[in-house]
Amino acid sequence: MATIKDVAHEAGVSPSTVSRTLHDSSLISQETKAKIWRAMKKLNYSPNFAAQNLANNTSNIIGIILPPDEESVANNPFFGQILQGITSVCNQQAYMVSIATGKDNAELIENVQMMMERGRVKRFIVTFSQQSDDVLEYLDRNNAEYVLIGEPIKNIAETLYVNNDNVAAGNDATEYLFDKGYHYPVYVYENLEEIVQKDRFSGYSHAMERKGKTPLNYQIKKDHTKEKLQEFIDQHPEADSMVACDDIIGVALQNGLLAIHQNLDDYGIISFNNSLFARSTHPSLTSVEIFPISLGMEAAVLILNIDDQDFTRLRSTNFSHVVIPHKIIERESTKNN
Amino acid sequence: MATIKDVAHEAGVSPSTVSRTLHDSSLISQETKAKIWRAMKKLNYSPNFAAQNLANNTSNIIGIILPPDEESVANNPFFGQILQGITSVCNQQAYMVSIATGKDNAELIENVQMMMERGRVKRFIVTFSQQSDDVLEYLDRNNAEYVLIGEPIKNIAETLYVNNDNVAAGNDATEYLFDKGYHYPVYVYENLEEIVQKDRFSGYSHAMERKGKTPLNYQIKKDHTKEKLQEFIDQHPEADSMVACDDIIGVALQNGLLAIHQNLDDYGIISFNNSLFARSTHPSLTSVEIFPISLGMEAAVLILNIDDQDFTRLRSTNFSHVVIPHKIIERESTKNN
């Protein structure tokens, strides 16, 4: 089995340079690092991470914290794609990825605690943001490093996060409907306590107000009835189009309209996420792609480099988040005006 | 910080009993184990797993291997639910769960290798079965223990696996259509190389043959055209219903029928998986629930107990797999006969 010395000899550097490279020190140039990684690969060198972990009191595992909402994790393709983005970057860099789930915040925190204490995991990616920030508080209190996917509620300046600009996305979706000739879009949501849904609603509201129109919203929950939708439609004959807060709500809205015998072609619908739900429903939904795989990849790059000195310098200045762009994918649901 | 001795004192047992409990030895009764776990919890005892791992040359991490099919992982809710089942059991037993993904078998195996070498992971749950068994061969060659979710192709007697009885499920779905008064179901699939789709087709074929009818199948691939579906419908006027190999194919079939101006109510459709796709399409799909969360939970129970002596005894006899039942959930798509 190859040792650090063998790798140093092969790469023509000192053993301490190899060791620093293993810890991804910013003192070593990218070129030298690349040379050393090639030497490791050639010699099939495998650092003994278990021994290292013990010495460092830390581990080469990145913890991924999924939301305490089992329904969402099971049904929303967003999380599968985020996981793919994270694991592709982490595995490539020889980091393992470990996931924590839980029915509620308490169970989730218990599992995060287990990872920190027993697995010595010190770095996390939190894949959701919520009004209650128990989980982030727990991480802060225990000096864990983390990157948030989503928008932080508190400590925005000190939090590293990766996000879409959901206010801009809400605005763009609404303007898209105006451009297509629709006159009165309604915002359709499930829960405005969720930051993403709230932000998209802000963007929608801005676009409406710029046109001198009063924002109008409609809630679809699990116990939604067709009578409620009928009542809303009757009260708002001006409504000719909808901005649905995600594809799943978009499909639920289509089914609601069908249930009260509305012609789907009479309403323009744009939704968010551009998942398979948007592509497979009929008429297929125009939807805003938010690139979850990129969100996951960028979060992984941030957390893997969090101890880098250049990076620390960067954090102490202005840099604290990465914005992933969004893109409107046109389909059948907005083609009738 | 509490020690093993403190825990032993609190629980009124010897330190070696505590140690055996930590390794989940079958020599210790469930009652005693429960007493010891309670004492650990009370004293907030946290075994130093990093040190243990080094001593044992193994780790308290269960590796989960996702299929080398990024499209499926990103879109099929099946995998999110399997992950939930696995993590709920593992986290409860203070095991971490680490996931391996890859674009193809080669990349996947590279990541599994990394987990084995650097993370000392020795126990895996493989969440898919395919005709090519490169991944399982790699695990066998490297003396890893694993539980398969799905049906093994080779070494069936020696492989531990958790599965639905997909042949029976295919049969039951077809008989359900006959019971509802349909006369000629067609099996609609994407890829018969996939074991699950092949098994459901076998079950369908048995049910057809028992009625003296020739099995008939139709393939929907990504490049599927409405002309092809039109041709099939024209050639087979006897077809009055469909068994779709999963919900996503069921929805694709509905859209295909709509595109050639067929009335969806004229065809009975039953699909498999009972995911949100089945619930949210219109008309909603009657679908066979296969309980992915249970598949994940049972696989986790098997892999966590794989070193248990009772379990080894069990394996040497007949036991090698767990079958999770299935259940037909009736909806609108089979109500018109």
Image (cartoon, coloured by chain):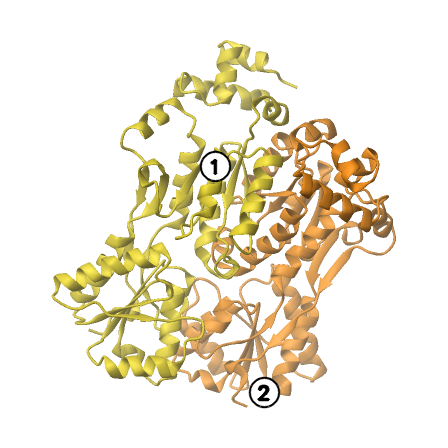
Chain colours: A yellow, B orange
Which quadrant of the structure image shows residue B3?
Answer: top right
- Look at the image and tell me in which quarter the N terminus of chain A lies: top right
Residue behind mark 1:
A141
* Image vertical order of residue B150 relative to residue B1, above or below: below
Q: Chain of mark 1?
A: A
Which quadrant of the structure image shows residue A42?
Answer: top right
Can residue A189 be seen here? The reply is: yes
Whether discs 1 and 2 lie on one chain: the answer is no
Mark drawn on residue B133:
none
Left of A218 or right of it: where is B143? right
- Look at the image and tell me in which quarter the C terminus of chain A lies: bottom left
Dots 1, 2 in contact, CB < 8 A: no
Where residue A92 appears, x then y in whole percent?
49, 34
Q: Residues within 10 Å of mark 1 (few under 14, many from 20)?
A: few
Estimate the spatial distance between the alpha carbons at disc 1 and disc 2, rounded to whole Å: 63 Å
Where residue A100 appears, x then y in whole percent?
55, 46
- Give the amino acid type for the residue marked by disc 2 in the picture: Tyr
> Residue at position x 48%, y 64% from top?
B221
Left of A199 or right of it: where is B309? right
Mark drawn on residue B182:
2
Residues B202 and B303: in front is: B303
Where residue A314 appears, x then y in whole percent?
31, 28
Where residue A193 appears, x then y in whole percent?
37, 59
Nearest to viewer (mark 1 / mark 2): 1
> Residue at position x 77%, y 43% from top?
B24
Q: Chain of mark 2?
A: B
The secondary element bearing badge 2 is classed as loop
> Residue at position x 63%, y 78% from top?
B174
Q: Residues within 10 Å of mark 2 (few under 14, many from 20)?
A: many
The secondary element bearing badge 1 is classed as helix
